[in-house]
Image: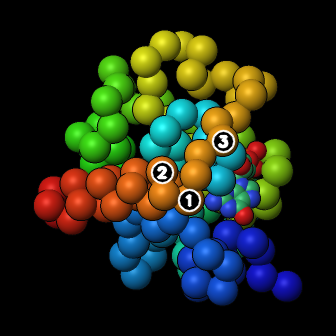
Amino acid sequence: MATIFTRIAKGEIPSYKVAENDEFYAFLDINPLAKGHTLVIPKNTEEDYIFNLDDPTYHGLCAFAKKVAAAIKEAVPCKRVGVAVLGLEVPHTHIHLVPLQTEGDMDFRKEKLSLSQEEFSAIAESINKAFESGK
Ligand code: 5GP
């Protein structure tokens, strides 16, 4: 059975898309640590553990996440964009990109933000715009 993230990348489950190419998909985390918290996934493998990816996919994922992070930095006021890989909940490799003001913004145990559909849509749109213009 396909992972929830494969189903998201295929559009079978809705998501707030931030960026996409043939190999990778970026979308807003539904339980964000901060406005603009984004997940970046490979579309053509469901490998669970990032360090089990083949080298081209691993390097491609990191390069794509770098471009998405630049777009987040442009669209969301923050000091920098933090990077984390946990994968304890969803068994499909994903990179977390989190806009940071303080170290505490990267604390995955803290209470998540509750955003409206309109807020999610507006954030995704502004990051996507920055991504497209930076291509
Ligand atoms: P992890 O596997 O890295 O420990 O956590 C999985 C992350 O995926 C969590 O931050 C969680 O909020 C997010 N997540 C889980 N299910 C969904 C979903 O259906 N849609 C979106 N957009 N994010 C999800």
Amino acid type, label 1: Gln
Rendered view: 30 above or below 36:
below
Question: Residue at horizontal 67%, vertical 70%?
Answer: 5
Residue under label 2:
119
In percent of width and height, residue 9 lies at 57, 77
Q: CA distance from mark 1 to mark 3?
A: 10 Å
Q: Nearer the viewer, residue 114 or 46?
A: 114
Asked where in the image residue 22 lies, by quadrant, the reply is: bottom left
Task: Give coordinates of residue 66: x percent, y percent.
Answer: 34, 47
Callout 1: helix, strand or loop?
Answer: helix
Q: Which residue is mark 3?
A: 114
Instruction: Judge by depth and name the residue closer to the eye, 76 or 93.
Output: 76
Quadrant where the N terminus is found in the figure: bottom right
- Tell me, yes or no, if residue 31 can be seen here: yes
Mark 2 near mark 1, Cβ–Cβ under 8 Å?
A: yes
Of pointers 2 and 3, the one earlier in the residue sequence:
3
